[in-house]
Amino acid sequence: MDLRSFVPSKISGPAKSFLAASFINGFANGAVNVVFMLYLTSLGFESSSLSSIVMMAPVALFTLMIPMGILAGRIGSKKMMILLMVPWILFSVIILIADSVSLFMLAFLLTGVIDAIANVVFTPLYASFFDVEDMDKAFSLQMALNILTVSVGSLAGFIPPMLQRSYGYSVRTSYWMVILMGVILFFITIPFYFYPVWKAPEIKRSASGFKINLRSKSVVIKVAFLNLLSSIGFSSFFNFFPYYINKKFGLQSDALGTLYFVSNFIRTGASIVAPKISAKFGTLKTIAGSLILCAPFYFMIPLAPDFFTLSIFYIFRLFLGNISSPLTSSLYMKLLYPDERPTANSFSSMATHGGNIIAPMIGGRLMEQVSLDSPAYLGSTLYAVLGGSYYLLLKDEAIKNDEIKK
């Protein structure tokens, strides 16, 4: 395999540290994600309670993204990173002691605060280490490494059944042990994130108050709309995916962990081939084609008669859809001037998480009042619309080339 096809020509020390943090963070996320919804289900929560919990993170994100983007533009990434530690520590404590809907809602609210700060720091930070011509490769490499470790982390789904069989742990306690492991790993990533933040050049910004600096307003508005559509299309169904397969097929974390392990390796392959395809067809056409082609497989997931068939549809949807994932971030950064990236990213992220507020309510209600399968039909339709909208809205926008010198 020619590594030059998906690895940037030069990766600095701070960029390597950032990638190491993504590597560890991916493993932690993979472990926690495979058990967390089942952990809540083991506490007796139904889909309406789950939707109330899940929506708290996007509520915080929707509320805070713009203020945090403006604040990041004012005080810089170093102070923002210090600020990030406060909700991070509080979340880590609460998530381990929570046993009620209200406490889990508070924990998810804190994850929204964490993500609001991280989103305005990390994506522009990582982009600052690479030139425009290497941007697709840089984001594809980051996503490939992250997905690879998410895949390995998802094998933690086998830990709870093992703890129950061999050591007599309860279902709830066995899931909690995996969550504890994830929290520990999250803390290990902290120094790996701090190093690139401290080494990155601070962009000179206006000192005249909390002024919103956006020259690429049309790009931000269009991407915000696309992110809103994408988040509703994805989250209305996939936020409930562990709950869905548990209710439909009676499966637990070991089966889900196996699916996540296999499918995330497929996602890694999608991230690796993404820059090669974009080099041939163009970034925008690759994004649009990826989203349109994955929609039929999304639609077929609820039609699957068994878990094996569902897994095949799930994997095909995942591969095709995730070709676009690193390219959307890369394209957005290329369509913005460097000094406006933190603030612009806050606006588009606010739209994403606004959709994530709406999506759990839609998905939870549809599952309870229409059918367990109905959110998947809605999501697949929105993905087809999303692919066409990407091309039509962004085809006339120009790439900005005045990059920060590394």
Image: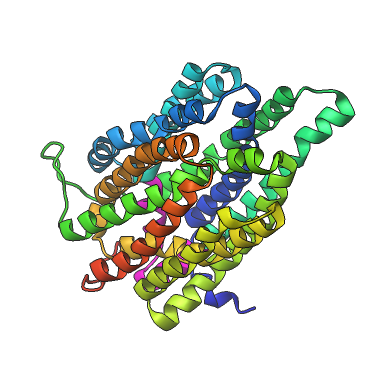
Q: Locate the C terminus by quadrant.
A: bottom left
Residue placed at 48% from the left, 61% from the top?
12
Q: Is residue 220 left or right of residue 238?
A: left
Identify the image quadrant of the N terminus: bottom right
Whether residue 184 is visible here, answered yes or no, is yes
Closer to us: 46 or 254? 46
Q: Is residue 294 left or right of residue 169?
A: left
The percent coordinates of residue 317 (x first, y second) are 54, 62
Question: What segment carries the magenta color?
Answer: 121-140
Nearer the observer, 331 or 70 = 331
Place of residue 89 in the rendered image (x, y in percent of width and height, measured from the top left): 50, 24
Q: How many numbered marks are there?
A: 0
Residue with the most extreme right position: 166
Which secondary structure is most common in the magenta stretch? helix
Q: Is the residue 236 above or below the residue 124 in the image?
A: above
Q: Residue at x 25, y 51 (%)?
A: 344
